[in-house]
């Protein structure tokens, strides 16, 4: 990456614009998709198909009154949304959009920057982005906000471990930590010889590293605080969670950060597991598909598919209970990732030891046996046994008494009483009423 | 030291002179901040600056791990605990031991002098190592090799110690469950046992003329529900005139 400074500036501005446009689009997209799922039209007034709805909403939010609670910690209160937005935007700088293209006579890659450990930038930014949420909740000086912030801190730390372990599997497989290089590594197929038959699997890691892919997708929803894991801003429990006391542009910037994070995590998933900007079909079908600016179509197509997945989850799944959510993170995702990493390491060593067939069989077979043993001997829930005799409980199945008469509605009773209706005429003067009382 | 400083490139020194004051400011803020959260945030700023220094010294892996582990996880846990103390808890400035502050300043300066002189002696004869990337091996490979060959034993010892500490903390925090697990069936039976009202307790004012705390709830038969009477607020029924809809349409004439 040896671009001149002007080209880097152009790329930086372009990344910013792409992200903002994607956010505006995603909000509209989410509302329309959820609307289709709920059999209603969704926003369709502003602009063609309602596309300008999110722009209108954003402008409206920006011009609202900006309030700050009297108990707020002023500096931190203002800094929190800035931290959230800055971290969200920074993370996108290492995502590769496409291969080398020639712009203004220069050969350059469609990526703002790339270096040896660029995947870690995204992880570091998402780790820092939590500060925005946590500090917002703390500095507001309100109980709802604080509860939201505590939930956010616990949630993101636990799901970051699962996310990191899933990414670690990609590092294991590719022996690379740079986003661009990982995309290129996935272009090669994976030759396998099973029982003498030579087959070439596609090199995209979601096939080879299927368990990691599943864990990554679950953890990335938890990491971005999206439904069904949107506990920090659970509106039915915590008003708006960490953002309860925020208004105007500050409130809008939290939403901006959330949607940018969604886009970034989708882009990271595409980069690590779905072949990045590579076309979703073999090269032989269309030789020019992976050259020039064409990969942008594949890349954004895959990202949009992931965003659809996010919206689909939101449209179908109810929010998890907090303890179930933590159980899922710590007792399922993290142990499964750890075991899978060990199995993967064993298999890779087995495959790397050369062509000594016994060693390979021993390693791969040993790994398979470990997995099978885990599946079979995993302590499962006690199976349900039918009761030997019917449960009589306390005089049969516990139900409320069935001979209850529905009580008359007290409001209708009140209206039937002539004294109530005559003394307080709604439009009559109050003086006469007061006079009667005295 | 001086050769080391002079060998830095222009971009590096620009970044150094921007970041060094910020890092120092964070360190000073950590000591001087009254509120624990502000202190923790200053520490996070210093750690971030250190991470950027690592990246500038062509150790990007170390830098990002510093951000992820120290700033992202450890400082977040600190914040997590500090937030639970409440926002208004600040350090007491009352001096319990006489002359403690003066002594602390003197000892602190002495400690700083010791550390800096030791550090200066340690790095005085250093030669700049060849950057890892140009030596044919990447940053990560070098660290992995050092960690898993030369320093394998200390590494394992440290991880063992940390695991012991974590398990010990869990043991202290663990609370055994009281009694056997009660399932849905047990709860349901208890709820419908004779003498227990199975429904939720009525909130004050549910069947009453007003939803004020002072207004007792009425049962469907019109009698007062004793569970809804407040211990502290004298019960008070509204008169029909008070309970009637208030005048809301424009000014009264």
Image (cartoon, rainbow, N blue to C red):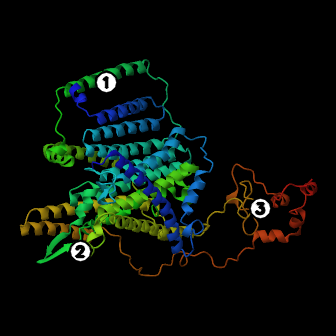
Comparing B180 with A4, the one in front is: A4
Q: Quadrant of the N terminus of chain B?
A: top left
From the viewer's perspective, tell me whether residue A406 is left or right of residue A149: right
Query: How crowded is the residue under tag 1: few (<14 C-alpha within 10 Å), some, or many (20+)?
Result: few
* Residue A58 quadrant: bottom right
Q: Which residue is mark 3?
A: B209
Q: Mark 1 to mark 2: distance in Å?
A: 67 Å
From the viewer's perspective, tell me whether residue A243 is left or right of residue B216: left
Which chain is disc 2 placed on? A
Residue lying farthest front?
Answer: A105
Query: How crowded is the residue under tag 2: few (<14 C-alpha within 10 Å), some, or many (20+)?
Result: few
Provide residue B40's location: percent of width, then percent of height: 42, 38
Comparing B227 with A274, the one in front is: A274
Q: Quadrant of the C terminus of chain B?
A: bottom right
Q: Mark 3 to mark 1: distance in Å?
A: 72 Å
The answer to whether any part of residue B93 appears in the image is yes
């Amino acid at each position: 990456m040896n671009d001149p400074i002007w080209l880097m500036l152009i790329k930086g501005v372009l990344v910013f614009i792409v992200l903002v446009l994607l956010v505006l689009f995603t909000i509209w997209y989410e509302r329309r998709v959820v609307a289709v799922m709920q059999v209603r039209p969704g926003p369709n007034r502003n602009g063609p198909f309602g596309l300008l709805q999110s722009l209108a909403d954003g402008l409206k939010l920006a011009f609202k009154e900006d309030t700050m609670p009297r108990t707020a910690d002023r500096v931190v209160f203002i800094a929190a949304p800035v931290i959230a937005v800055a971290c969200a935007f920074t993370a996108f700088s290492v995502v590769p959009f496409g291969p080398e293209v020639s712009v203004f006579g220069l050969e350059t890659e469609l990526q703002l920057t790339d270096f040896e450990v660029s995947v870690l930038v995204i992880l570091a930014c998402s780790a820092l982005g939590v500060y925005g949420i946590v500090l917002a909740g703390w500095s507001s000086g309100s109980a709802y906000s604080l509860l939201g912030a505590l939930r956010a801190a616990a949630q993101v730390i636990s799901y970051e471990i699962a996310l990191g372990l899933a990414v670690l599997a990609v590092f294991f497989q590719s022996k690379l930590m740079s986003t661009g290089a990982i995309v290129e590594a996935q272009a090669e197929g994976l030759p396998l010889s099973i029982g003498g038959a030579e087959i070439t699997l596609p090199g995209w890691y979601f096939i080879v590293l299927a368990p990691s892919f599943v864990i990554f997708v679950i953890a990335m929803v938890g990491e971005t605080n999206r439904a069904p894991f949107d506990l920090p801003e659970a509106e039915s429990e915590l008003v708006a969670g960490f953002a309860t006391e925020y208004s105007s542009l500050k409130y809008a910037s939290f939403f901006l950060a959330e949607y940018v994070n969604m886009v970034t995590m989708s882009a990271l998933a595409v980069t690590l597991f779905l072949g990045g900007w590579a076309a979703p079909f073999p090269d032989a079908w269309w030789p020019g598909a992976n050259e020039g600016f064409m990969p942008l179509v594949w890349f954004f197509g895959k990202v949009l598919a992931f965003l659809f997945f996010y919206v689909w989850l939101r449209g179908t799944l109810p929010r998890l209970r907090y303890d179930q959510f933590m159980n899922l993170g710590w007792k399922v995702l993290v142990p499964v990732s750890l075991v899978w990493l060990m199995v993967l390491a064993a298999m890779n060593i087995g495959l790397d030891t050369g062509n000594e067939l016994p060693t390979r069989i021993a390693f791969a077979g040993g790994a398979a046996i470990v997995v099978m043993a885990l599946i079979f001997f995993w302590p499962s829930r006690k199976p349900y046994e039918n009761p030997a005799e019917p449960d009589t409980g306390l005089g049969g199945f516990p139900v409320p008494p069935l001979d209850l008469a529905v009580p008359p509605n007290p409001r209708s009773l009140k209206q039937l009483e002539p004294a109530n209706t005559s003394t307080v005429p709604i439009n009559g003067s109050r003086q006469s009423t007061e006079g009667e009382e005295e | 030291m001086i050769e080391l400083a002079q060998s830095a490139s222009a971009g590096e020194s620009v970044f150094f002179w921007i970041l060094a004051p910020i890092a120092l400011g964070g360190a000073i803020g950590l000591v001087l901040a009254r509120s624990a959260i502000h202190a923790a945030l200053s520490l996070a700023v210093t750690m971030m600056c250190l991470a950027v220094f690592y990246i500038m010294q062509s150790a990007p892996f170390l830098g990002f791990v510093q951000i992820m582990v120290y700033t992202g996880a450890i400082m977040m846990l600190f914040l997590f605990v500090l937030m639970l103390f409440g926002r208004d808890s600040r350090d007491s400035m009352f001096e319990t031991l006489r002359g403690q502050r003066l002594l602390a300043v003197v000892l602190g300066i002495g400690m700083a002098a010791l550390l800096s002189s030791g550090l200066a002696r340690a790095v005085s004869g250093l030669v700049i190592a060849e950057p890892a990337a140009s030596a044919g091996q990447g940053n990560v490979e070098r660290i992995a090799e050092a960690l898993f060959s030369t320093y394998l034993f200390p590494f394992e010892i440290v991880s063992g110690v940390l695991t012991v500490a974590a398990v010990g903390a869990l043991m202290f925090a663990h609370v055994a469950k009281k009694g056997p697990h009660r399932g849905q069936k047990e709860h349901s039976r208890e709820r419908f046992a004779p003498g227990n009202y199975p429904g939720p307790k009525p909130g004050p004012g549910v069947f009453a003329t007003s939803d004020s705390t002072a207004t007792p709830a009425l049962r469907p038969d019109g009698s007062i529900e004793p569970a809804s009477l407040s211990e502290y607020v004298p019960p008070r029924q509204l008169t029909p005139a008070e309970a009637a809809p208030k005048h809301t349409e424009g000014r009264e004439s």
